[in-house]
Image (cartoon, grey):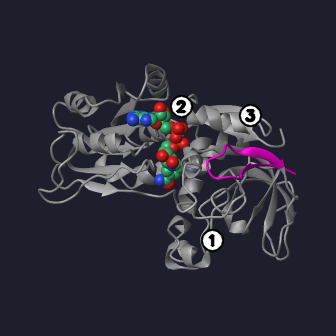
Amino acid sequence: MKALQYREIGAAPVVVDVPTPEPGPGEVLLEVTAAGVCHSDIAVMSWSAEELPFELPLTLGHEGAGTVAALGDGVHGLEIGDSVAVYGPWGCGRCIKCSAGEENYCLRAGELQIQPPGLGAPGAIAEYLIVDDARHLVPLGDLDPVRTVSLTDAGLTPYHAIKRSLPKLPPGSTAVVIGTGGLGHVGIQMLRALTSARVIALDVNEEKLDFARQVGAHEAVLSDEKAAHRVTELTGGIGAQAVFDFVGVEPTVATAGACASVDSDVVIIGIGGGNLPVGFGGGTLPAGLGQLAYEVSVRSPYWGSRDELIEVFELAREQAIDVHVETYSLDDAPRAYERLHDGKINGRAVILPNG
Ligand code: NAD
Ligand code: ZN
Ligand code: ZN
């Protein structure tokens, strides 16, 4: 079968022929209908050999959907041909976190060397994908896999981040979304669907800001050194009650901290490596942006839980959220990564390996 692989540190991914896998006991083989392209892959491909936590070659793609093609021994409850999406942050299934559905925070994944598809295990940008356990599949039913596949990450990750901050976002509050790409454009829609907060979006050019307005942002502000000041102005000098940073570089976390109101949440989702200093009287922000306000909570969440993924699909079913999709064939998948790298994708690039 064909697969898109990252094979050499620093090199672009390439389409190669690899053996079609067969499901072992307890595993499920999917014929992949759609696979999303996430910016985290760009980060992974920029890491040195020492930083990379898994072996190469790696088949990319941690957002996957497919139809059930074969069942390993002992798998029940699925039929050949079922349309399913893959819950990506695989865990052990037994620890206290996994038992609550929070496999993204499995306490034993490191020790047991369990890695997500596309981030250690072979990923979804291939004609076929092995899923390690049927519990990692969510039936899609009538949902279109192409429009839905990215909800497994670009939907689930913002949903988890926003859900935990809902108590901070009553009527009259303001939420800020920094970075309105794959995750951010879904995050804006979720904030509109789940809260009556005013949503202020930040991104780097007018095209992205227009896109943010199209998907529901009330205000869209250029993300520069004046952005925090602009947010403060737009909120009558108070600041935002929750700031979701889908970029996470030094300047954006500084902006996030500077526009966060007292007793607010700053949620750093982007893996750009920026740090926000937290501490009583010690939360001095860079770039002359002052101090973090009293009782700001700072979180850095990872992906989301299995029950949250089901909730995200319900939001899609209610048409409260919709992923803006650009589709590519498997042969053309390297170009999707180039365009994502160059900031040229509005929404999400989705690969159709059998399309
Ligand atoms: P993307 O490339 O689709 O979107 C990023 C957006 O940020 C783009 O619109 C870009 O123009 C904008 N941007 C870049 N620099 C900016 C700046 N200085 N200020 C404001 N906007 C800026 O990326 P994505 O796939 O949505 O991923 C977003 C981030 O989230 C990445 O860092 C990714 O690795 C990370 N991520 C984290 C998790 C998690 O579990 N924490 C999960 C998935 C992705
Ligand atoms: Zn991702
Ligand atoms: Zn576990």
User: Gap between marks 1 and 3, in whole Å?
Assistant: 29 Å
Q: Which residue is located at x 56 percent, y 29 percent?
A: 346
Say which label, 2 or 1, has the lower sequence index. Answer: 1
> What secondary structure is marked by label 2?
loop
**Residues tagged 2 and 3 counted as in contact (Cβ below 8 A):** no
Figure quadrant of the C terminus: top right
Q: Nearer the viewer, mark 2 or mark 3?
A: 2
Q: Which residue is located at x 53 percent, y 61 percent?
A: 305
Q: Where does label 2 land, which residue?
A: 343
Residue 95's disc number: none
Kindly indicate the quadrant of the structure image that contains residue 72: bottom right
- Mark 3 close to ligand 1, CB under 8 Å: no
Q: Is residue 199 above or below residue 294?
A: above
Residue 328's disc number: 3
**Residues tagged 1 and 3 counted as in contact (Cβ below 8 A):** no
Q: Residues within 10 Å of mark 1 (few under 14, many from 20)?
A: some
Q: Which residues are magenta?
A: 1-16
Q: Is residue 209 above or below residue 333?
A: above
- Mark 2 close to ligand 1, CB under 8 Å: yes
Say which label, 1 or 3, has the lower sequence index. Answer: 1
